[in-house]
Amino acid sequence: MKTYRDFDRYLKDFPDKNGYFGQYGGAFLPPQLILVFQDITAAYQEICHSAQFINELRRIRKEFQGRPTPVYHCSRLSRHLGKSQIYLKREDLNHTGAHKINHCMGEGLLAQFMGKKKIIAETGAGQHGVALATAAAYFGLECDIYMGEVDIAKQHPNVIRMKMLGANVIPVSHGLKTLKEAVDAAFEGYMKEYEHAIYCIGSAVGPHPFPMMVRDFQSVVGFEAKDQFVEMTGMLPDTICASVGGGSNAIGLFEAFLPEPVEIVGVEPLGRGSNVGDHAASMRFGSKGILHGFESILLQDKQGEPLPVYSIASGLDYPSVGPEHAYLRECGRIQYDAVSDEEAMEAFFLLCRYEGIIPAIESAHALAYAIRRARTQDTGAILVNLSGRGDKDIDYVFEQYGTGERFLK
Ligand SMILES: Cc1ncc(COP(=O)(O)O)c(C=O)c1O
């Protein structure tokens, strides 16, 4: 078991040169893509050490995205719950409404540096799609976004946004028609045009170097939050938590806190319950396996085929998790828990009514975990990554739950 004291050099040492975090990660690719991914890794290594690239990314974050995003103390909600103080890192205030823009602008800069004409990706909740379509418009690139038909219906406002930004939204109609199938289809699309396109994966998943690159671009969230929290309260938070789909907002918040005496919790979707097909809690119910070109923890059947997944949050229903999360759980530094649709929706409505903030349903999962803790034990200060805003969700939520009166009694 490792403690926070073992993490001083972690960012420099992980992943190794083949993209492994312990036994997880790597790049399992068809032969024609091996050199392509080596080129992407080499280009990333070059630009991430270039002052010009770093300065340009800093300028974009400040002037275009609106960073730094604030840390906010939920004083009314904390008083209502009783036992802990809840704070939010307001990633919902990023341009385009979620943390996804943090890695999309970095990936856009990389695409430009590599002379690519098109960026390709999948999207679940539509937040990665909107952020990437935005990056494409900003850098003058073409953009193809693959999205499952179920998610297209559920996240309609984001579909319109992507189209307005000039992206080509390609519906995916096979299987469960959600995030995993969208990733399958985006990979297939990319295989046909890798010479002039780059696949900008939407989370800290996929073959090396994507889990590392997305982690690096997202780590701004935690480094900012740590300084802001200390400035605000004079201390570090006792606990930090974030929702985990593929794991990009979570790893972004967690990285800066790994070497600090802070409890870290990733929150997965338990959906309707623990039966196969009713949740997407990969860490709780999964085992080691390979999907989409990387090795991690996977919800799989006996033949190694991914199992069907479900969550009310379109951005969380993925049957695996980024390899760095699998490693950090294995070495005991991060714990993973799960919350149900019902708990997430209660958190959604409590944040609306007590703080005047409508969260993304994905982010409401992390908040629900903090609420559970605040009700049951004196946890001190909990910092939650509010990874996105709920504008994309309001039509669906209103249709299913009205204005949430039953959660507010
Ligand atoms: C607002 C928001 N939060 C969280 C997630 C989950 O993704 P990740 O685990 O990569 O942060 C998504 C995915 O679409 C999202 O839109």
Image (cartoon, rainbow, N blue to C red):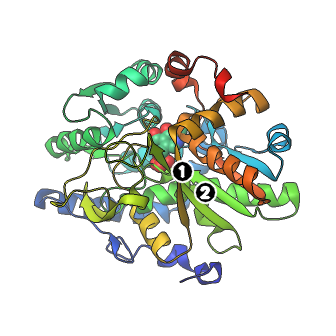
Labels 1 & 2 near each other (Cβ < 8 A): yes
Q: Is mark 1 within 8 Å of ligand 1?
A: yes
- Amino acid at the residue labelled 2: Leu
The reply, left or right, for residue 220 in relation to residue 199 is right
The reply, left or right, for residue 335 in relation to residue 186 is right
Up-down: is 180 above or below 325? above
The residue to which callout 1 is attached is 249
Q: Is mark 2 within 8 Å of ligand 1?
A: no
Across and down, in percent, residue 32 comes to 12, 57
303 or 388, nearer to the observer? 303
The reply, left or right, for residue 5 in relation to residue 330 is right
Q: Is residue 360 visible?
A: yes
- Amino acid at the residue labelled 1: Asn
Q: Secondary structure at mark 1?
A: helix
* Res 258 → quadrant: bottom right
Up-down: is 373 above or below 38? above
The residue to which callout 2 is attached is 253
Q: Is residue 162 visible?
A: no
